[in-house]
Amino acid sequence: MYFVTSRTVDGDTLFNTNQKKEILVHRISRSVNKYRVCIYGWVILMNHYHILFSLPKGKSLSDLMRYINGGSAYELNNYDNKPGRKVWWNFWDNCVRGNKDIYTRLNYIHHNPVKHGYVKVNKDYRHSSYSWYYRNLGVEYINDLETKYPVIDCTAS
């Protein structure tokens, strides 16, 4: 299981509209079938994203990230009419082990839009897996996870 963060070049806010964020959402969604990825959590902000996922044995993390970042850069550049622009700076990955690590990182992902001031309440942010958890597992489940596994800065590890 991996926790991946990817940031735009110079932290530029290239994903600054819902339509641009949807480009990345759809690219990540297509990666599920292409690479048989199991995604547990995700969030897309204006200049970075986080994903928590497992990748089947034999599948390459670098191939997956090239598919997501390379493909989304191409699509975004077409949308903005800026061919050849470098979109992504890099990605950072951490191997995730154990329930504590999984749920702490999931909570971090879901708290990111609040942390960065996009919304006051997680459920109000559209480009995150939080809404799926909220709709399908309920607020009690989410609150229980947040109590047991408080949000910490997962990018420091």
Image (cartoon, rainbow, N blue to C red):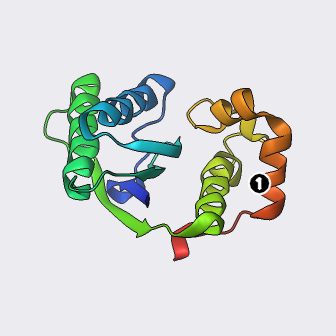
Residue 129 in the image, given as x and y percentages of width and height: 59, 37
Residue 94 in the image, given as x and y percentages of width and height: 42, 69
Q: Can residue 86 be seen in this view?
A: no
Q: Which of 149 and 77 is in front in this view?
A: 149
Q: Can residue 135 be seen in this view?
A: yes
Tell me the crowding category of disc 1: few under 14, some 14 to 19, or many 20 or more residues within 10 angstroms, Cα based.
Answer: some
Q: Residue at x 78, y 45 (%)?
A: 142
Residue 132 in the image, given as x and y percentages of width and height: 64, 31
User: In the drawing, does residue 127 fall left or right of residue 14?
Assistant: right
Q: How many marks?
A: 1
Q: Which residue is drawn at 37% across and 36% down?
A: 28
User: In the drawing, does residue 125 fall left or right of residue 93?
Assistant: right
Q: Which residue is drawn at 70% across and 28% down?
A: 136
Residue extending farthest bottom: 157
User: Which image quadrant: the N terminus?
Assistant: bottom left
Q: Residue at x 78, y 56 (%)?
A: 146
Q: In what element is the residue under mark 1? A: helix
Residue 155 in the image, given as x and y percentages of width and height: 52, 69
Residue extending farthest left: 84
Q: Which of 35 and 83 is in front in this view?
A: 35
* Above/below status of 98 relative to 138: below
Q: Nearer the viewer, residue 148 or 88?
A: 148
Tag 1: amino acid: Leu
What residue does disc 1 label? 145
